[in-house]
């Protein structure tokens, strides 16, 4: 169904397994500035009425700047938990998480809010736009919390909307936009603060296949321009758009492959 | 997030839900309305007391030497009252002694007052407020003569039957006529009208134009003071300091004249406008306390309504809070957003309440003899109270919103 559009940078060398291992094993040390995400034995337990559920049982993940990574896994594999941790919406029970050189795993609520604002651009399955605000205002919102002046906000938000080809829809409210357009507004909002990572949670989950392909093209383009993209999905054919696919099973990483190997493994048509 | 951004957001929220917002702020609105109305009326009365009543009836820098206080505060016990009744009456001899003691430049005039029937050839008999006094009285009271002249010290000395009348007396007894030179009978004695006062207006609905002012030595005194005593001596000093000195001097001289030993209390009274004002200040304090206690209950109810509505708003907008937190809103950003929203609601309520309260005060002033004067401080206070009520009412809901877990909030639809 989907055409696995490949960018020119497809063959760029990814970090080797040895390099990844090296950065992960240096426990307690800040990774080099090329590494945008490093997690060391990341664990997250939930207390479900006396019974402890181990959602993540020790995840070691290293992502270098400019990588385009898909995190895949069936429901219950812990991928949503991992996404919440990577997105700084939650803190781990144990382990380290370094985001863009900062140790964020022990930060306070407000410090995490700052990190989310500066380092992370979220794209959600359900778009999560403010229904009563215009596209422009939705895109401005992260800048509002970053304390950017009104005129500068307008300028940067319009630029972000132009990047996703929505320059002519700035004054429209979400309910006046199609699903694909809404998701592009959400992408513009995610990009407006120039984040270290674009974190997408099932970005095509609510879209038809044609619109999904359109959104995947947007991601492809961003990755080609050097944006680090982390995409969480349970669909193999969507995951196959990324240059690297991490598969999670029962709270641990089951496999970590380049696209070619992943495509071959799951038997997707090439 | 900037403060104005929060206000803009709050106003947008209020615009979207106009009717709900209106019902939310109605409690604060009514509370503030009564607050402003009550304070305005009390303030109006108090202004009236200082500007009009105290200055016009008692006079500025003035004291009155009398047998007992004319205006007194609160309850008078029986024993006090009996003590007052036992005091000697003020006589001409007392007045002469007091005058002797006064420093130069201080004016004084005897003041005897009774309501007495007067008659003229042109209308039915009617009661007038008869003043037996002296020439200096016109200067002390700043009574201007509209036509004719005041009486002279010589006429006082001779006890001439001449009278200066108020405008109401003039129009009643001499309809469409020039009263000057005509005859007015006061207590049976024919008086010649020699002057008409400027219109004085009324105080607490009590007309100041029904006066008939004649020399206290004239035949009228048989009716005003049949025992031959004197009601009081009004003394006016040019400055407040001189007034104090004069009072001290009069006190010591009078105590000597009356033969009081050091242990005995004064058996006379010296009343100043301050006495009357202190009485009113006490009254005003009580009226403000009572008058604001009731609207305060309204404000508490208003605060509870706002708190409830804000809790509902937080519940309704949980998902929005999740979005805002996900993209970087800190706890204080969210808290401020909801605090500003409830404060804005409440301040709008207060502003509506202020306008209605001013209207109510004006209405009361127009249809009752109660004066009303809107005090600027009460408007500022109402806005501060409004904002305070909003912030207090919004604090708990805003804190709840601020503490929401972004993951859970995002999952709520």
Image (spheres, coloured by chain):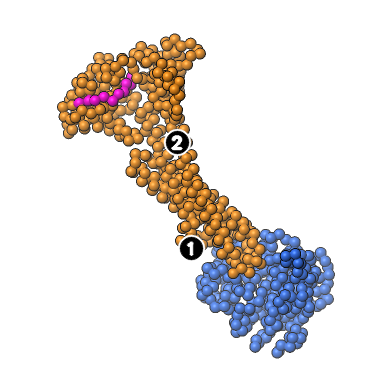
The residue to which callout 2 is attached is B284
Is B23 on the left-hand or right-hand side of A109?
A: left
Find residue B322 and report its horizontal and vertical position in percent: 62, 65
Q: Quadrant of residue B272?
A: top left
- Density class for disc 1 (Cα within 10 Å; few <14, some 14-19, many ≥20) is few
Label 2–label 1 contact, CB within 8 A: no
Chain B color in figure: orange
Q: Which mark is residue B216?
A: none
- Chain A: give its colour: blue
Residue B90 picture location, percent across and down: 37, 15
In the rendered structure, the residue with mark 1 lies on which chain? Answer: B
Q: Picture coordinates of residue B36 (x, y %)?
A: 44, 45
- Quadrant housing residue B190: top left
Write down the residue under mark 1.
B17
Q: Residue at x 42, y 11 (%)?
A: B258
Q: Which residues are magenta?
A: B106-119
- Left or right, B177 with respect to B261, comes to left
**Measured Cα–Cα span from mark 2 to mark 1:** 41 Å
Instruction: Give the residue displayed 36% in from the left and 11% down from the top.
Output: B93
Q: Is residue B232 left or right of residue B27?
A: left
Give the structural element (helix, strand or loop) at label 1. Answer: loop
What secondary structure predominates along the stretch shown in magenta? strand
């Amino acid at each position: 169904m989907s055409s696995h559009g490949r960018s020119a940078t497809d063959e760029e060398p990814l970090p080797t397994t040895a390099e990844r291992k090296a950065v992960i094993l240096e426990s307690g040390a800040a990774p080099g500035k090329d590494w945008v995400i490093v997690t060391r034995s990341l664990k997250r337990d939930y207390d479900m009425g006396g019974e402890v559920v181990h959602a993540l049982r020790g995840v070691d993940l290293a992502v270098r700047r400019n990588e385009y990574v898909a995190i895949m896994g069936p429901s219950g594999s812990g991928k949503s938990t991992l996404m919440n941790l990577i997105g700084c919406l939650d803190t781990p029970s144990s382990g380290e998480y370094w985001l863009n050189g900062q140790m964020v795993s022990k930060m306070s609520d407000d410090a995490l809010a700052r990190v989310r604002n500066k380092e992370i651009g979220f794209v959600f399955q359900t778009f999560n736009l403010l229904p009563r605000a215009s596209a422009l205002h939705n895109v401005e919102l992260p800048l509002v919390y970053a304390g950017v002046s009104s005129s500068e906000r307008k300028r940067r938000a319009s630029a972000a909307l132009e990047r996703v080809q929505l320059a002519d829809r700035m004054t429209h409210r979400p309910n006046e936009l199609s699903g694909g357009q809404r998701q592009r507004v959400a992408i513009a909002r995610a990009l407006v603060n120039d984040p270290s990572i674009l974190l997408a949670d099932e970005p095509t989950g609510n879209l038809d296949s044609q619109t999904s392909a359109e959104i995947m093209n947007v991601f492809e383009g961003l990755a080609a321009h050097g944006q680090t993209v982390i995409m969480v999905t349970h669909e193999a054919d969507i995951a196959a758009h990324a240059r690297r696919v991490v598969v999670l099973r029962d709270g641990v990483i089951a496999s970590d492959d380049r696209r070619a190997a992943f495509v071959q493994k799951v038997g997707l048509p090439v | 997030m900037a403060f104005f951004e929060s206000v803009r957001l709050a106003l947008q929220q209020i615009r979207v839900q106009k009717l709900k917002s209106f019902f939310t702020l109605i409690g604060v609105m009514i509370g503030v309305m009564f607050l402003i109305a009550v304070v305005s009326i009390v303030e109006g009365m108090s202004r009236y007391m200082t500007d009009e009543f105290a200055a016009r009836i008692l006079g500025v820098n003035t004291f009155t030497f009398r047998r007992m206080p004319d205006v007194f505060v609160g309850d008078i016990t029986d024993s006090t009252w009996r003590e007052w009744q036992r005091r000697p009456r003020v006589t001409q001899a007392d007045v002469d002694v007091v005058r002797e003691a006064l420093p130069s430049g201080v004016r004084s005039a005897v003041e005897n007052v009774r309501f007495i029937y007067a008659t003229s050839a042109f209308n039915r008999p009617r009661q007038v407020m008869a003043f037996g006094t002296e020439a200096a009285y016109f200067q002390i009271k700043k009574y201007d003569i509209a036509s004719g002249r005041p009486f002279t010290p010589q006429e006082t000395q001779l006890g001439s039957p001449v009278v200066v009348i108020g405008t109401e007396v003039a129009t009643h007894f001499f309809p469409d006529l020039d009263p000057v030179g005509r005859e007015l009978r006061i207590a049976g004695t024919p008086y010649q009208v020699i002057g008409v006062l400027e219109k004085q207006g009324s105080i607490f609905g009590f007309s100041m134009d029904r006066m008939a002012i004649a020399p206290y030595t004239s035949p009228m005194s048989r009716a005003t003071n049949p025992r031959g005593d004197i009601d009081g001596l009004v003394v006016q000093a040019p400055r407040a300091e001189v007034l104090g000195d004069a009072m001290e001097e009069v006190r010591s001289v009078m105590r000597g004249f009356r033969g009081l030993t050091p242990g005995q209390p004064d058996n006379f009274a010296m009343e100043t406008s301050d006495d009357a004002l202190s009485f009113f200040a006490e009254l005003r304090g009580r009226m403000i306390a009572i008058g604001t206690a009731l609207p305060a209950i309204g404000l508490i109810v208003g605060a509870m309504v706002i708190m409830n509505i804000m809790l509902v708003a937080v519940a309704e907008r949980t998902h929005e809070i999740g979005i805002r937190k996900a993209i970087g809103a800190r706890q204080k950003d969210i808290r401020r957003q909801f605090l500003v929203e409830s404060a804005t609601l409440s301040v709008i309520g207060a502003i509506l309440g202020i306008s209605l309260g001013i209207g109510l005060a004006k209405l009361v002033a127009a249809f009752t003899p109660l004066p009303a004067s809107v005090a600027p401080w009460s408007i500022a206070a109402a806005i501060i109270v409004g904002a305070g009520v909003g912030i207090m009412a919004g604090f708990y809901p805003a804190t709840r919103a601020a503490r929401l877990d972004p993951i859970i909030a995002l999952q709520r639809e």
